[in-house]
Amino acid sequence: MARYELLNNVTHKDLRVVTRFGGEFGDDIGMVLAFPTEYAELQREYPIFFRKDRESGEWQSVALLGFEQKENLFLQGERWNAAYLPGVVAKGPFLIGFQEQRIDGELRKEPVIHVDLDHPRVNSSEGEAVFMPQGGHSPYLQHITTVLRGIRDGTETGKAMFAAFESLGLIQPVAIDVKLDDTHGVNLAGLYGIDRERLAGLDAASLHLLNHAGYLEGAFLVLASMHNVRRLMAEKQRRLQQHADAVSAASERAA
């Protein structure tokens, strides 16, 4: 269970964060939340889909990492085999909270960084230092701050963007049902994408509305990301073949 504390350079002066990857850090997961602020980076390597949050019923976007709940096809040993790391992964044990602060005589809720002290990446001996010896923010923490800002902005942008897409009928179910080899296949349900034909058929006023709000680019980036499904399939097939070869070799040795 998470144990969040407001991050500060006194209590947490020796805090370090492990930045390698593995199942022990929760990286063996089939999809992660994605935010419109990172679509341009994500679409180069990850398929982006929509789904409805089970609790709130609100739309959210996700980057697909694998075809099973605990399958991350980008995870190779302690490496994440992609040039861009999704923000929700890159942020590690940190999140943005809000604290009331008096600024210019006015009480405001200002964003502040919290850290989960029970996160498996957190320790005091290994990994990236969060603070410099003099107490200043380390380059790692500066990077985390940028990531968290993107997540915060992307969360707000996403709500309005998804509502606009839904109102125009652009969010439609996507069927992923493919055969990988003679004995393995993929069948994913509950995912949605941008309907290319509906988007192409929008009238000028609707297109102008999307473009003026900055959402039209997001729709095209989601569509562009779909070619990455083939990349995931190829990696899945490679691993299945690798496993089959290993089983065959083991059988030959046993014989």
Image: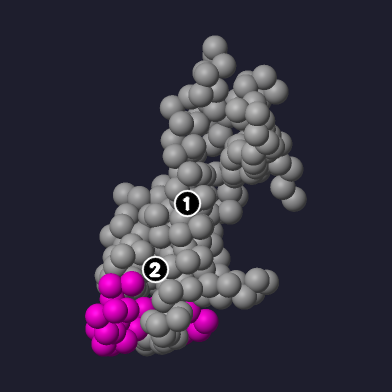
**What is the basis of the colouring in this image?**
one colour
Whether residue 87 is visible, yes or no, is yes
61 shown above or below 78? below
Of helix, strand and loop, which one carries label 2? strand
From the image, which quarter does the C terminus lie in?
A: bottom left
Q: Is residue 204 magenta?
A: yes
Q: Residue at x 54, y 36 (%)?
A: 18
- Relative to residue 48, is residue 9 drawn left or right? right
Q: Which mark is residue 48?
A: 2
Residues rendered magenta in the picture:
187-209
Mark whose residue sits in front, 1 or 2: 1
Q: Which mark is residue 153?
A: 1
Q: Which mark is residue 243?
A: none
The amino acid type found where label 1 is placed reads Asp
Whether residue 21 is visible, yes or no, is no
Residue 201, percent from left and from top: 26, 87
Q: Residue at x 58, y 72 (%)?
A: 58
Residue 189, percent from left and from top: 50, 84
